[in-house]
Amino acid sequence: MPFKRKTLSELREQNEQFLRSELKEPGALLRFSNMRILADMDAGMAHMHYGYLDYIAKQTTPFTATDEWLAGWGALKRVFRKAPQRAQSQSVKATGLSGSVIPKGCKLNRGDGYQYQTTREATINIQGEVLVSIIAILPDINKNPEGGGSLGNSPSGTQLTLDVSIVGVASEFVAIDLIVGGTDIEPEEAFRSRILEAYQNPPQGGNASDYVVWAKEVPGITRAWVRRRLLGVGSVGIYIMCDANTNDGFPIGTDGPATKEAYQVHATGDQLRVADHLYDLQSVTALVWVCSPIAKKIDFVFSGLSHIDQETKRKLEGAIDGFFYENSNPADVNMINPADIDRAIFAALGLVGYRLDSPSTEIELGIGEIPVCGEVAYQ
């Protein structure tokens, strides 16, 4: 039976009743009498102690612990909160006079003031251009408690300006490739989820749950699935998602194994970050292939909902996205039943009096496919 914590008013009344019962000549306690003040003071102290006990009770289990207490529970299982990661790009075009040198650490500013710096020295060639690599400079943690890593992600074509001019180098730089890989500090609930997974799935020397735990240790990776023998005997396929990025949650890069793997091709981007992390953890006999799921768009047609407002439409489509998030598994063949989607919508919004016209039959998802909400029509 749960413990019911008394309110401050209840504690004050309890103290007053106790005092009256103990006094030889009980009577009403005057508002400013010494006894009433003492009773109220004692009630306040008791309320504070109950509050502290309530707080420390929350910290006694990883299900409810917060802040440094949650970090402590994670440390017992060698699970640590992911730090913010800096966005970077290997291809940013600079122009200028042939032979001009762009030093390592040269700062560049984006239009909104976000800063990057070059990671190596570069010399402009005889064509008057050169490709430089850059990495973001994380903002002050006091100004951005979330870390500010995701703010550094930018599309190709982003223009950057030299913070301090360099002789013979044009002030405008252009990102040829995406500037990606930036992530914020891991949200507390995502951190808690990884901790609970570690307690629920003790290490087994390389079983499926181990690969999921290892993949989620990489900053930016929010979901992972394991497919045994994806490329044949001895291979392990890992599908990953990066739900906080700017690519609709899909990893940015190409599929493949780790850099150290003796193979003809290797992964790039987000897939490579995971593959390289797994390389020193996985079984020595396994060929680990890290993959991005393939989006399978599913269009919807609802009848009887032509009158609903934009906010309700947003919530309905959010319920569909939430259902797909919870029921995705690209590591196996899956079936999606429209009736299950109906139940998810009702649970989220309580909508009645409508009909889901399409899809009307079960939808099959092949290996590697993940459902994504497509066009939604309201009739």
Image (cartoon, helix red, strand yellow):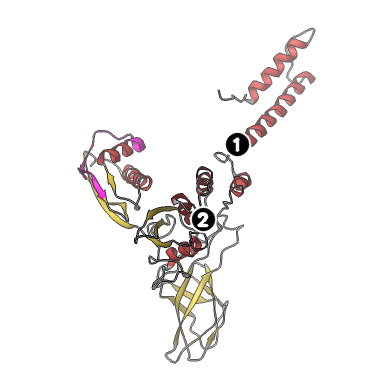
- The residue pinned by badge 2 equals 217
How packed mark 2 is, by other alpha carbons closer than 10 Å (few <14, some 14-19, many 20 or more), is many
Q: Is residue 276 above or below residue 316?
A: below
**Which residue is drawn at the image coordinates 46% and 74% (left, top)?**
90
Task: Answer whether residue 376 is visible to the viewer in this image.
Answer: no
**Callout 2: SS:** loop
Check if residue 361 falls in the magenta segment: yes
Kind of residue at badge 1:
Lys
Q: Nearer the viewer, residue 107 or 195?
A: 195
Residue 34 visible (yes or no): yes
What amino acid does circle 2 point to? Glu
Within-10-Å neighbours for mark 1: few <14, some 14–19, many 20+: some
Residue placed most toward the observer, 308 or 281: 281
- Asked if 37 appears above or below 278 in the picture, the reply is above
Residue 304 lies left or right of residue 294; in this view the side is left
Q: Which residue is mark 1?
A: 58
**Looking at the image, is mark 1 or mark 2 earlier in the sequence?**
1
Residue ID at (23%, 36%): 354
Which residue appears at 49% of the width and 63% of the height? 279
Residue 99 image offset from top left, x and y in percent = 51, 91
Residue 211, percent from left and from top: 46, 54
Instruction: Give the left or right position of residue 120, taking residue 21 as reference.
Output: left
Position of residue 128 measured from the top left corner of the image (x, y, whole percent): 44, 89
